[in-house]
Image: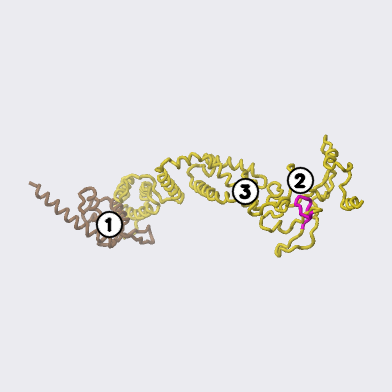
């Protein structure tokens, strides 16, 4: 399951982060962006987050529902599915393995 | 959370982004844009309209993260019925081509080269089917090589063949405009129908042998069994009303053709034993042998009650179509002299001896 393609991994990191945030609590698009930014991923683009939410929804990792409001447009909320939870766990473990490996390599390379 | 304000900047921004998603199915696109509207409203509410940035970049990033091609590709909307049908027809056609192309001797290519023949054949088949349903087929007199269709057969055949050829060449609907789904489906349907009618049409060509088998071989001298009696414009003739040169009605006219055959009308045009339906023919009989002759006109008729099949009333000569006709002449021809040849012993203008006269003569 280790993917050595870095672009995939970067995309995968965002998947992981988004899943984690949604797993913590359901949210709508901008809310999730805000949580990711305050969590430390300040540079993350909201378009990327929305696109990721869409992709995770299409793959079945997330579910969505609309909350209507009296004033202003509806809010589309995302929630995590059982499939999303297992994907989150898998990717969390993968990430842990990957990051420890890379860290170890870097520690070895630093003079 | 306060309700976001959807400013005009957001609307415009979204319009551009929406345009960049035009290759998505409309419900997917609406889904994406709908959620964005509120979120971008929030963004603007917090950071002002400048936070929106370039909508094209935004769209590209969005597409990339969503797993789509960064730039819009060919429109990929949900397929219409037309597209589904066309692709099904194309797929079937491709499968057929694959299946026949490998056969030894290229039989399919040979058949394809016969296409123009098929165009002619299908027109002919169409007319034969029409004839079967409404023309001579309805009278069960069988089909002929040139469909009779109540006399319109030959000109109709020419027209239909021309139309069929033009369709085959792609010059006429449903072959044109090329590729349109409905026309294509219609063409496939009509061609299939034409192929299916071949056995039915072939079965209805009655040969002389068939006629004998059904009606029995004609007994020598008998004119009663006549499967194909006189017909006119494709329809069997039931009775004949002769008038002479002065226009007067005649009775007891015996018709013989140039080959010496008795010109009979058929007693049973439907070959079901039901005769002419509600009227049945009552023929003249030979004066000496009493054998009935179906070539003596006009015949008397007998009404039949259709439900019981019983005769109603008495047989009789019916009201002729005309009381009298205009007189006619044959200029330049000596008719009287010719008539004398037929009856060399009789005086000019004399009537044939009546039975009483002949009896009188015999008694003398």
Chain that is coloured brown in the picture: A
Disc 1 chain ID: A
Q: Which residue is mark 2?
A: B256
Disc 3 chain ID: B
Residue B5 visible in the picture:
no
- Local secondary structure at mark 2: loop
Q: Residue at x 79, y 62 (%)?
A: B313
Q: CA distance from mark 2 to mark 1?
A: 107 Å
Neighbourhood count class around disc 3 (C-alpha, 10 Å): few under 14, some 14–19, many 20 upward: few
Q: Residue at x 40, y 49 (%)?
A: B77
Quadrant of the image for the N terminus of chain A?
bottom left
Q: Is residue B55 left or right of residue B279?
A: left
- Is A2 placed above or below B97 here? below
Chain that is coloured yellow in the picture: B
Neighbourhood count class around disc 1 (C-alpha, 10 Å): few under 14, some 14–19, many 20 upward: many
Q: CA distance from mark 3 to mark 1?
A: 88 Å
Disc 2 chain ID: B
Answer whether labels 2 and 1 touch (C-beta < 8 Å).
no
Q: Is residue A43 left or right of residue B349?
A: left
Q: Nearer the viewer, residue A35 or B88?
A: B88
Check residue A51 for magenta coloring: no
Q: CA distance from mark 2 to mark 3?
A: 24 Å
Answer whether labels 3 and 1 touch (C-beta < 8 Å).
no
Q: Which residue is mark 1?
A: A32
Q: Which residue is mark 3?
A: B207
Confirm whether circles 3 and 1 share one chain.
no
Confirm whether circles 2 and 3 share one chain.
yes
Residue reaching furthest to the top: B332
Q: Earlier in the sequence, mark 2 or mark 3?
A: 3
Residue A72 at what x, y percent from top left? 37, 58
């Amino acid at each position: 399951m280790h993917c050595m393609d870095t672009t995939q991994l970067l995309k995968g990191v965002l998947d992981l982060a988004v899943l984690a945030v949604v797993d913590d609590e359901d949210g709508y698009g901008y809310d999730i962006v805000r949580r990711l930014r305050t969590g430390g991923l300040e540079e993350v683009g909201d378009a990327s987050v929305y696109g990721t939410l869409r992709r995770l929804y299409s793959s079945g990792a997330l579910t969505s529902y609309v909350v209507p409001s009296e004033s202003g447009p509806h809010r589309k909320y995302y929630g995590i599915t059982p499939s999303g939870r297992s994907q989150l766990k898998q990717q969390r473990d993968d990430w842990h393995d990957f990051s420890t490996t890379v860290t170890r390599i870097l520690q070895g390379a630093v003079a | 959370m306060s309700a976001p304000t959807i400013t005009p900047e957001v609307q415009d921004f979204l319009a551009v982004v929406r345009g960049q998603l035009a290759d998505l199915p409309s419900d997917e696109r609406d889904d994406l844009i709908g959620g964005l509207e509120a979120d971008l409203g929030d963004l603007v509410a917090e950071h002002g309209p400048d936070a929106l940035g370039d909508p094209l970049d935004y769209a590209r990033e969005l597409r990339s993260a969503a797993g789509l091609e960064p730039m819009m590709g060919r429109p990929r909307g949900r397929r219409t019925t037309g597209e589904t049908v066309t692709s099904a027809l194309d797929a079937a056609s491709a499968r057929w081509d694959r299946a026949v192309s490998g056969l030894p001797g290229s039989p399919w290519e040979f058949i394809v080269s016969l296409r123009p023949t098929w165009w002619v054949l299908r027109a002919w088949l169409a007319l034969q089917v029409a004839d079967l349903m409404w023309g001579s087929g309805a009278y069960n007199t069988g089909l002929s090589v040139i469909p009779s269709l109540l006399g319109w057969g030959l000109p109709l055949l020419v027209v239909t063949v021309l139309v069929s050829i033009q369709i085959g060449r792609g010059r006429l609907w449903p072959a044109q405009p090329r590729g349109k789904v409905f026309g294509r489906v219609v063409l496939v349907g009509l061609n299939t129908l034409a192929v299916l009618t071949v056995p039915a049409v072939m079965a209805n060509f009655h040969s002389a042998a068939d006629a004998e088998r059904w009606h029995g071989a004609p007994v020598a001298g008998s004119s009663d069994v006549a499967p194909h009696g006189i017909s006119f414009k494709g329809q069997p003739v039931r009775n004949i009303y002769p008038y002479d040169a002065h226009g007067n009605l005649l009775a007891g006219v015996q018709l013989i053709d140039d080959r010496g055959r008795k010109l009979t009308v058929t007693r049973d045009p439907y070959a079901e034993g039901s005769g002419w339906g509600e009227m049945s023919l009552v023929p003249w009989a030979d004066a000496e042998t009493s054998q009935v002759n179906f070539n003596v006109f006009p015949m008397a008729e007998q009404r039949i009650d259709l439900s019981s099949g019983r005769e109603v009333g008495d047989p009789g000569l019916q009201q002729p179509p005309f009381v009298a006709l205009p007189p006619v002449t044959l200029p330049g021809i000596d008719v009287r002299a010719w008539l004398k040849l037929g009856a060399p012993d009789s005086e000019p203008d004399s009537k044939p001896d009546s039975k009483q006269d002949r009896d009188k003569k015999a008694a003398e």
